[in-house]
Amino acid sequence: TKQKLWGGRFTGETDPLMTKYNESIGYDQRMHYADVRGSQAYARALCQKNILNEHERDEIIRGLDLVEKEWAAGSFQLDPADEDIHTANERRLGEIIGKHIAGKLHTGRSRNDQVATDMRIWLREECEKIMEYLKDFLMATIARAEQEMDVLMPGYTHLQRAQPIRWSHWLMSYAHSFMADLERLSQLITRFNKLPLGAGALAGNPFDVDRDFLAEQLGFNGIAGNSLYAVSDRDFIAEFLFWASMTMVHISRWSEDLIIYSTAEFGFIQLADAYSTGSSLMPQKKNPDSLELLRGKSGRVFGQMSGFMMTYKGIPSTYNKDLQEDKEPLFDAVNTISDSLRIATGVLSTLKIRQEKMRASLTMDMLATDLADYLVRKGVPFRETHHISGEAVRLAEEQNLSGIDQISLEEYKKLHAAFEEDVKNVFDFESSVEKRTAKGGTSRKCVLEQIESIKKSLEEV
Ligand code: ARG
């Protein structure tokens, strides 16, 4: 059997199931690039302190470039003794440049500061990709909101018809949530982008490696300022998992709205074939599976967050092997959120809206608030006008009228003397919507302002 990286003091064999149980190479190999870069920077730092001479440093950097080339080409051959990405890369480096030089790389370093560094580098780059996906989604939202500004639909509370709104206003409501997600993600990267490398196993580096130099080499904006903290801390993973959960909540609620809007009963939207599936039994079916999966996968990301929090909470100070359990939840959440954002963008940019159905679902009772507001503008206190407007709704029902617009002026005057000929202007959905002119409202001007402000934030983030 092969010699393990840490095998010197051992005489007994590891139980084969234990070997399997212990290794993380199956999933942490996706950090190969981060691991190679971290080691190359570390070789430079060791050379500054004369632990490596320049030839040895250059050999290590060259060898690691070759290791990375193998990973990139898919030709890296795993060895059964490779426990994780760190041991695999070091083993392969030794095969390429010789063990004598390769064996110097790990001086003063531990897998504890190494893995914490690799994960931050890896996550930082994934977060940057995710930010792009989120921006694409926001841009698709804005594009629709601009194009379909004229379209009116019912707005709901309690899933009951409430007041008319612009479809664009609905779209932009989610843009606000997703914009906040984008800002939070960008802040999160800044917060966690601190370098653990140079902390050693726990106590610090005895060769005085220049950690500021390492941070700069590896694109960190500072160093983790305590060696115990540097190898212990996985708050950034917890924070990312919360971030992903929150974002998935927005995706899930957005999906739920669209699932409802896509039913025959609503009929407001129709999903593109590209994002729907059929039924194996019922030939007529077209199901919104994309949206259902978006909604469903939010539960999965939540699970990764709470699972990791359970693992994290009881771990004593510094590195414990429990921390290896940070990877699968993180990787799974990154996969899920990345795919989900791209699917959501695809769904949104290809769905068709059915304006006539949205328009036909607007009913006169949705203007009852406007009727009350009409009297308010004539000086009647709102608490009274609310009641009067309610009476009008009841009257229309009792008289089997199609709506409050069918009540005669005479009858209205009986409800209140302030009603005049111009009450008929209330019964117009467009004018109802256009009255919501205070910032953030559903009038055209306000929705355009929202679009401008989100566009501006997109440039700034
Ligand atoms: N594969 C390990 C992990 O992901 C690397 C660190 C191992 N360190 C140690 N002292 N056993 O956490």
Image (cartoon, rainbow, N blue to C red):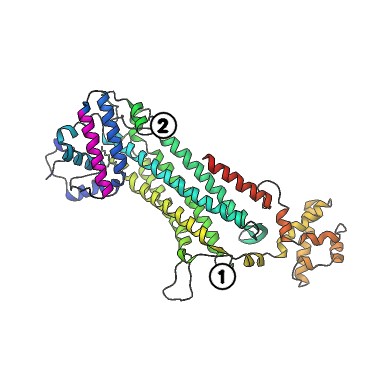
Which residue is pictured at 68% across the width and 59% down the height? 164
Task: Give me the residue at 64% from left, 50% from top.
Answer: 447
Q: Is residue 76 magenta?
A: yes
Q: Which stretch appears magenta?
A: 55-77
Count the numbered circles shown.
2
Quick one: SS at disc 2? loop
Question: Residue under circle 1?
Answer: 264
Residue 290 relative to residue 223: left or right: right
Q: Quadrant of the N terminus?
A: top left
20 and 210: which is toward the camera: 210
Residue 307 position in % (x across, y down): 38, 48
Q: Amino acid at mark 1?
A: Ala
Q: Residues within 10 Å of mark 1 (few under 14, many from 20)?
A: few
CB within 8 Å, label 1 to label 2: no
- Specify whether residue 24 is in view: no
Relative side of 9 to 139, left or right: left
Using residue 413 as the reference point, say whether residue 401 is left or right of it: left
Q: Residue 442: within the magenta?
A: no
Identify the residue at image location x=34%, y=39%: 315
Q: Residues within 10 Å of mark 2 (few under 14, many from 20)?
A: some
Residue under pointer 2: 221
Do we see residue 454 in this rendering? yes
Whether ligand 1 has any atom under 8 Å from the Cβ at mark 1 is answered as no
Circle 1 or circle 2, nearest the eye: 2
